Image: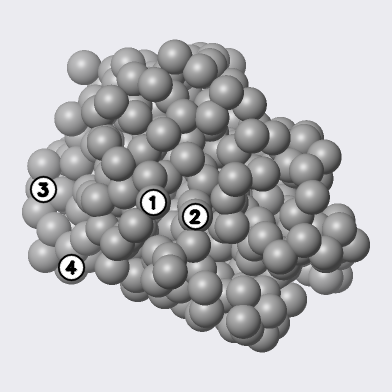
Amino acid sequence: MAPQLAWLGLGNMGRGMSKNIVEKGNLDKPLILYNRTIQKAHDFSAQVGNSTVASSLQEAVSKADIIFYCLGEDPSVLETLEEILKVDVKGKIIVDCSTVHPDTTAKEAKLVEDKGGDFVACPVFGAPAMADAGQLICVIAGKTEAVQKVLPYCKGVMGRANIDFSGQEPSKATLLKVIGNTFIVGMVTALSEGHVVAEKSGLGVEELHKFIEVMFPGPYTAYSTRLKTGDYYNRPEPLFAVDLARKDARHAMNLAETSGCRMRQVELADSYLKTVKEQKGEKGDIAGIYGAVRMQGGLPFDNQ
């Protein structure tokens, strides 16, 4: 018999991930949904089908065998886990898909295991659109038996590929996730600086974009398109919010410092992200680094 699953929180990523569990997870019981705003959970349940709404977080946890959540900030993760652990979790698997500091992951694992449960870290690479399309990359770590019970909901359901650290400490997954995110912020910084120099030198951003399409298809081309079309500042809500990008940068810089080294590329990117926050507030996006680089070069933040 398949386990009973619950999903806590329905943010941008959570909606896409839980939708794919409903649609492709071969559930023989409805997915239990919980969201702080209960009506949001009811509306989402009506949209995706094969799900039911719990009236409280504790109700969702008490009825489930495997509990997933994906939240934005480390304090929110620990607050949610505190609420989860008010329920008897013996024999249950708690799965955190959030991007948090590895120390936070280690703390979560100890808290859950001290209560007799199993903890699995499963942070994911990809934007909300990739979550919706089931194209995330899942990084999964924890005790082998627990991980094996979670893997059926990763590749082929929530994601297109797994990076499997079965049998290793859960913090290994978030360590990779934090370091991996520095490649994303570095890519956006390099593209932003290239676009600005291309514009100011007379080459032109369209000509640079042609090179990027041929040489770097995939994420580089996608982000280059976001820059040249103005998508980096005119979206109603960000794809990768500036506050979350800066949180990830802080985690990366802290990891580097405690390891006796530095990530100067991340330090630079964070200085640009500070400008993005000043200019666009909570609507700022990681791609807004382009606007900050434009301002540094004497151009307006918005390119259109």
Q: Amino acid at mark 3?
A: Glu
Mark 3, residue position? 207
Relative side of 68 to 240, left or right: right
Question: Pointers 1 and 4 in contact (CB under 8 A)?
Answer: no
| Secondary structure state at the residue bearing disc 3 | helix
Which quadrant of the figure contains the C terminus? top left
Q: State how far apart marks 1 and 4 are (Cα).
A: 47 Å
Q: Earlier in the sequence, mark 2 or mark 4?
A: 2
Q: Amino acid at mark 4?
A: Met
Q: State how far apart marks 3 and 2 are (Cα).
A: 53 Å
Q: Which of the two discs, 1 and 3, sits closer to the camera?
A: 1
Q: Which numbered disc covers residue 215?
A: 4
Q: Which of the two discs, 3 and 2, sits closer to the camera?
A: 2
Q: Amino acid at mark 1?
A: Lys
Question: Pointers 2 and 1 in contact (CB under 8 A)?
Answer: yes
Q: Which of the two discs, 4 and 3, sits closer to the camera?
A: 4
| Secondary structure state at the residue bearing disc 4 | helix
Q: Which numbered disc covers residue 161?
A: none
| Secondary structure state at the residue bearing disc 1 | loop
Q: Earlier in the sequence, mark 1 or mark 4?
A: 1
Mark 2, residue position? 4
Q: Position of residue 303 (x, y in %)?
A: 26, 22
Q: Residues within 10 Å of mark 1 (few under 14, many from 20)?
A: some
Q: Earlier in the sequence, mark 3 or mark 2?
A: 2
Q: Where is residue 90, by image quadrant?
A: bottom right
Q: Residues within 10 Å of mark 3 (few under 14, many from 20)?
A: few
